[in-house]
């Protein structure tokens, strides 16, 4: 995987500092403002991990010195056993045969983590190991999860919730059907590269209904950063690079063919939900979202405030 150059912090650090200052001003009467939650969505392989690490380190360091935690939506994936059960229960739905799409996360767990952090309680941050079971993945034993807000710790005041589907909002069956029919028409005209048209409508609707539960997380966001791609098809090449790096590091992981099948499984979500995410998680002209559009080289081509 090529070395990543940080050309994004000059955009997102001032944005987040601005939003934090407004958050603090809005709660000026309180000694300790409520937990500030940052949602971060990035096309897989676009450099989101580097961005998250840099942002968290920046906020933890002077002059900000803000205790900051990071939670990945990937760490909320169902346990291996629960994922197998989900796949078995819906054997004809290819979208839930492995982790990835909405419905394969434990949203109740995520909400409990946020609630605990808001209350200032000692909180275990879930962890997931994608290399287990030859790349199928499984949750790390809870005894190994990091605990924050321990006794004598400074209380976490900023949480970054990051992931490939963070901020996606359900469309409803009619809107899903419309996008699916449009994709089918493109497929019939031989002018189609996506995956949406290759899925049954009922399978897409199942995922969309599951996505409604994710609003329990999204509705808690105070700011949103969206690392977008000029072409979401870049994800295939980027994800292959990621998995090759994982195999080298862990000694186990998915083959290239498995990676392509894996991306096929969640690519329909990009086709369904990216337009709404680009328009703004909080609605238009909220000022609370930053969209960074990157090229195939992962460098920022444009920054937009939806």
Image (cartoon, rainbow, N blue to C red):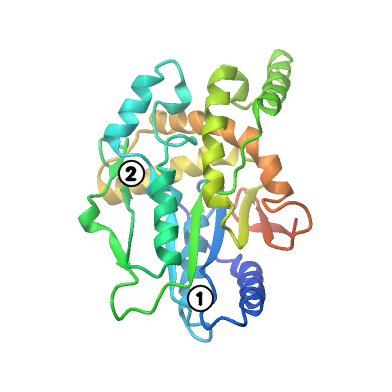
Residue at which label 1 appears: 59
Q: Relative to 116, does residue 152 appear above or below in the rendering? A: below
* Residue that lies at the very extreme toward the front in this rendered image: 29
- In which quadrant of the rendered view does residue 19 lie? bottom right
How many marks the image carries: the answer is 2
Secondary structure under the numbered disc 2 in the rendered image: loop
User: In x, y percent, where is residue 249?
Assistant: 29, 51
Horizontally, is 54 left or right of 302 in the view?
A: left
- Tell which residue pokes out farthest to the right in this image: 285
Front-lying residue, 40 or 223: 223
Question: Does any portion of residue 233 appear in the rendered image?
Answer: yes
**Which quarter of the rendered picture does the C terminus lie within?**
bottom right
Residue 272 horizontal side relative to residue 145, left or right: right
Q: Indicate left or right for 84 with 25 as reference.
A: left
Residue 97 in percent (x, y) is at 40, 26
**Which one is closest to the eye, mark 2 or mark 1?**
1
Q: Label 1 neighbourhood size at 10 Å, few (<14), some (14-19), many (20+)?
A: some
Identity of the residue drawn at 39% across and 62% down = 116
Cα distance in 3D space between marks 2 and 1: 28 Å
Report crowding for label 2: few under 14, some 14 to 19, many 20 or more residues within 10 A (C-alpha). many
Residue 165 in sight in this render: no
Quarter of the view holding residue 174? top right
Secondary structure type for disc 1: helix
Q: Earlier in the sequence, mark 2 or mark 1?
A: 1
Image quarter of residue 189: top right
Q: Residue at x 65, y 30 (%)?
A: 172
**Mark 2 in CB contact with mark 1 (< 8 angstroms):** no
Outermost residue on the top side: it is 188
Counting from the top left corner in percent of width and height, residue 77 is at 38, 42
User: Which residue is disc 2 drawn over?
Assistant: 130
- Taking depth in this image into account, of 243 and 158 the one nearest to the observer is 158
């Amino acid at each position: 995987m090529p070395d990543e150059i940080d050309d994004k912090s000059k955009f997102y650090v001032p944005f987040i500092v601005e939003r934090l200052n407004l958050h603090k001003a809005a709660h000026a009467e309180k000694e300790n403002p409520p937990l500030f939650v940052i949602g971060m969505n990035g096309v897989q392989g676009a450099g989101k991990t580097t961005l998250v690490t840099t942002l968290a380190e920046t906020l933890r360091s002077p002059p900000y010195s803000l205790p900051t935690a990071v939670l990945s939506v990937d760490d909320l994936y169902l346990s291996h056993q629960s994922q197998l059960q989900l796949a078995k229960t819906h054997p004809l739905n290819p979208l839930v045969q492995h982790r990835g799409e909405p419905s394969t996360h434990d949203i109740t767990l995520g909400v409990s983590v946020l609630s605990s952090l808001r209350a200032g309680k000692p909180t275990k941050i879930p962890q997931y190991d994608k290399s287990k079971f030859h790349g199928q993945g499984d949750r790390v034993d809870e005894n190994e999860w990091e605990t924050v807000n321990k006794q004598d710790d400074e209380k976490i005041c900023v949480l970054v919730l990051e992931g490939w589907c963070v901020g996606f909002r359900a469309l409803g069956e009619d809107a899903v059907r419309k996008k699916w029919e449009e994709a089918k028409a493109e497929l019939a005209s031989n002018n189609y590269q996506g995956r949406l048209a290759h899925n049954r409508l009922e399978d897409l609707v199942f995922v969309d209904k599951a996505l409604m539960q994710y609003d329990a997380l999204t509705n808690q966001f105070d700011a949103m950063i969206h690392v977008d791609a000029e072409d979401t098809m870049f994800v295939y090449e980027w994800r292959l690079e990621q998995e090759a790096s994982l195999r080298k590091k862990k000694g186990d992981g998915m083959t290239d063919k498995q990676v392509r099948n894996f991306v096929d499984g969640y690519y329909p979500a990009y086709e369904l939900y990216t337009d709404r995410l680009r328009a703004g998680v909080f609605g238009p002209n909220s000022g609370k979202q930053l969209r960074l559009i990157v090229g195939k080289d992962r460098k920022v081509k444009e920054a937009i405030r939806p």
